[in-house]
Amino acid sequence: MFYERQLLRDASEHDACDDDWVQSYRQVSRGTYRSSFELMTVGDAVISRERIGPAVAQETRSPGGKLSFIFPMAAQGGWRVNGHHETGRMVALRQGETELMTVVGAESDLISLTLPVEAIGLSAAGSAVRSRSRAPADEALGDWLACLLGFGALEGRPPVDLERILPGLLAEQFLDFWAAFDDRSKGLTSRHVSLDLFRRVERQIADDPGEPVTLPALAGDLGVPIERLRLAFLDAVGMPPSIWLRLARLDGARRDLLDPSSSLGDVSDIAMRWGFFHLGRFSGMYRRHYGETPLATLKRLDRPRTRRP
C-alpha cells in the first residue's frame, strides 16, 4: 500500500499527478490557485481525491483495460462534460480508454476508485462513460473511500490484516457500484455537436498560438456565422469565445513563465508571443486572474532560465 498527498500551486501541475491518466488542466476562473491531490494504491486498486479552488477546464483520457468510479462531492455550478451540463447529485463510470472535455466549477471535490477490469471478473470492458443519480449505496462507498484516504494520511498504512483483505473489499464494493448501471444510465461519451466546432477552433489556434485571434476572423476561416460560433462556445465550455480565447492565451503565457527551460527570457517576450502587446494591461489581467504578477510567477520557481543570446 502507498499513500501520498500533493499541494499544487498551478493547474498545469495536475498533468503529471497520475501516471495512468493523460490529462491537461487549465484555470478558468480568477484567484490564487490552490489544490490538493491525494493518491492511495491498494494492490491493483487506486483511490484518489482531488480538491481544487478555482474553476478549471480538464481534458482527460482514462487508462485502457480499467474501470473508474467517479464520485463528485462538490463543485459550484456543477460540471460541463463533453458539452452536457451536469448539476445534480450524480456518479459516473468511466470504462476503458475514454476522452472527456470537462469544465468544473469552483471549489470542486472529486473522489475516484480505479480497478483493472479483471478485478470484478470482466474479460473485456470496452469503452464507455455513463452517469446516473446518486444512490444511498454510492454515498456509503464515497464516504468509505474518503475514510481510507484519511487513514492513509494519518497512519501511512492500515494494520497488516486489514491491508491483506482491502483489495478484495474494494473489488466487492466496486462490483455492486458497476452493477447498478443499466441501459437507463445516461451516456456521456456522446459529443455535443457544439464540441466539434469548439475543437475546430482550438486546432485553428494551435496552428499559430502567438497570433492574436478575433471572433470574426475565426468565423470566416471556419465558414460559420459568428453567432453560431458564439453559441458553440457557450454550449461546450459555458462561456463566450472572447473570454475562453483570452484565458487560453493567458494559460499559454503562464506555462512559459513556469518553464525554466524556456528560451523566452523575460515577461515582455512571453507576453508578446501570446498576443499581448501592451505589457501593463497584460500584467493587470494576469494578476487579476492568477492572484500574482507575471514577474512573481517567473521568480517563484527560483531556477535559472535559458535566455536568448
Image (cartoon, rainbow, N blue to C red):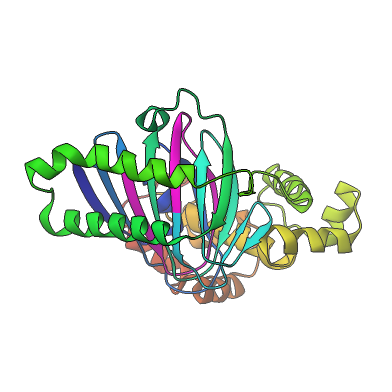
With respect to residue 128, does 202 lie above or below?
below
Q: Which range of residues does the magenta coloring cover?
A: 46-70
Q: Is residue 278 left or right of residue 262?
A: right
Q: Residue drawn at (91%, 48%), measured in percent from left and top?
A: 223
With respect to residue 271, does 44 lie above or below?
above
Which is nearer the eye, 268 or 160?
Answer: 160
Where does residue 111 sit, x and y in percent of width and height?
38, 56
With respect to residue 27, does 2 lie above or below?
above
Q: Is residue 43 left or right of residue 254?
A: left
Q: Is residue 298 left or right of residue 180?
A: left
Q: Residue drawn at (24%, 35%), measured in percent from left and top?
A: 43
Q: Residue furthest left?
A: 160
Q: Residue drawn at (68%, 65%), measured in percent from left and top?
A: 238
Mark yes or no: residue 269 visible.
no
Where does residue 82 sit, x and y in percent of width and height?
65, 51
Q: Is residue 55 magenta?
A: yes
Secondary structure, magenta segment, majority class: strand
Give the quadrant of residue 300.
Answer: bottom left
Where does residue 49 sit, x and y in percent of width and height?
35, 56
Mark yes or no: residue 133 visible.
yes
Give the quadrant of residue 182.
Answer: top right
Which is nearer the eye, 98 or 183?
Answer: 183
With respect to residue 182, does 122 lie above or below?
above
Q: Quadrant of the N terminus?
A: top left
Q: Is residue 237 magenta?
A: no
Numbered circles on residues, count: 0
Q: Is residue 87 left or right of residue 35?
A: right
Which is nearer the eye, 95 or 258?
Answer: 95
Where does residue 252 sit, x and y in percent of width and height?
56, 54
Which is nearer the eye, 8 or 234?
Answer: 234
